[in-house]
Amino acid sequence: MTLALSYGRQWISEEDVDAVRDCLRGDYLTQGPRVAEFEASLRRATGARYAVAVSSGTAALHLAYEALGFGPGDTGVTSAISFVATANAFLYCGGSARFADVEPDTALIDIESLRRVASTGPRPKIIAPVDLGGHTFDRLAVRRIADDLGAMVVEDAAHSLGAAYTAGGESFLVGSCAHADAAILSFHPVKHITTAEGGAVLTRHEHVYQRLLSLRSHGIHRDPTRFVRGAEDPYAGPWYYEQTELGHHYRLPDVLCALGTSQMKRLAEFVTRRRELAALYDRAFASDRFASKLRPLEVRAREGSAYHLYVVQLIERVGESLRDVARRRRRLFDSLREQGILAQVHYIPIPWQPFYAKSGAAEYPGAESYYARSLSLPMFPAMEEADVARVVAAVEEGLG
Ligand SMILES: *Cc1c(COP(=O)(O)O)cnc(C)c1O
């Protein structure tokens, strides 16, 4: 029997298993030396000045927003197409979320829509676009809008670890925070590297870094130079620490950091492999067999993409409604399932979620068009050339 191919999955090597086993047999299961090691590997790979490992990508979003001073009454803007966590984290902080539309053929934040949303209604404190599928949003344009409004930028780079983008003719690594105040990563098994569950915040601001460290662990610190009542506490001793704000327990344990550091050794290889697989798909879907039926998502910065997803879009027939295209997309999805190909749809527009829809029925034509026509096909580094061929054949069969 041939194995089902899902849209994404982890690749755990024997070295990864050894790294975890060594940690399990050592002195620290949590908060030992492996946390700093993992953070150093993230800094090296992204060029970020500071990296803070946390328990999930969602925790990373919450901490990043909070450490940047986002709080009750504040408004954040993200893309209508992202995972719900990008918006939810604004609400964890007591603020609210608004949405900019996306370009229907790239699924990336639509700059004109962002400008409109950000300059009407409450002024956003944070703009948090997502590198959907591993393809980078327009860093310079977003930064310019943020600067005009005095807003901060958080890159949701959960899909784009290992990606690069160009701005003003220069090349930058995603996560370097060259055009952002912070960036977040996720290490969920479908992402580029995994720690089972895990995430990280990257930043270039020292004060944000200090705040992240505090908020990651209950708002507690042990730095004597910052003690508020340490000298006055007649019972103080080497055990002394102070809680100076309300933090969380968002730490990532040593066992998982050991896995992360081991996985990071193969990040470049993983990303290269994803680009190779994307090129194989691109070539296959450029064939006449697919003309006027289906095309890959438009990727502007192909060379730099980290290809978290490989998305294809059905092409609308003349006079066909989006609902009709969506019906054909559904038939393709079902046919792929029957053939053992577990495609997915990333994502349902967040403002359509019942939780968000109650706050008004704004329209997102770009997000709607993208959502109706798109499918994510299998894309993970352990795939073989034959797997790509199998998916392509199944798509051809499914299109009928
Ligand atoms: C995976 C993901 C997250 C959240 O990551 P978790 O580690 O699952 O909490 C946030 N944003 C996007 C775009 C993601 O894909």
Image (cartoon, rainbow, N blue to C red):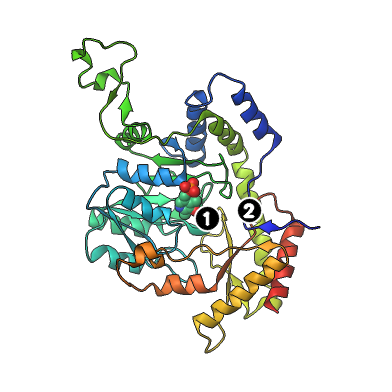
Label 1: few (<14), some (14–19) or many (≥20) C-alpha neighbours in 10 Å: many
Q: Quadrant of residue 343?
A: bottom right
**Contact, mark 1 vs mark 2 (Cβ under 8 Å):** yes
The residue depicted at 52 percent of the width and 34 percent of the height is 41
| Residue 320 as seen in the image, left or right of residue 5 | left
The quarter of the displayed image where residue 241 is located: top left
Q: Of the residues shown, which amino acid type is indicated by label 2?
A: Arg
Residue on which disc 1 sits = 134
Which amino acid type corresponds to the residue marked 1 in the rendered image? Gly
Is residue 1 in view? yes
The disc placed on residue 274 is 2
Task: Give SS at disc 2.
Answer: helix
The spot of residue 210 in percent (x, y) is 32, 32
213 vs 184: above or below: above
Mark 1 to mark 2 CA distance (whole Å): 10 Å
Regarding residue 284, the answer to whether it shows in the image is no
Badge 1 residue CB within 8 Å of ligand 1 = no
Q: Position of residue 162 (x, y in %)?
A: 54, 47
- Give the structural element (helix, strand or loop) at label 1: helix
Residue at 58% x, 67% y is: 375
Q: Is residue 103 above or below residue 379?
A: below
Q: Residue 91 in the image: x percent, y percent?
A: 32, 52
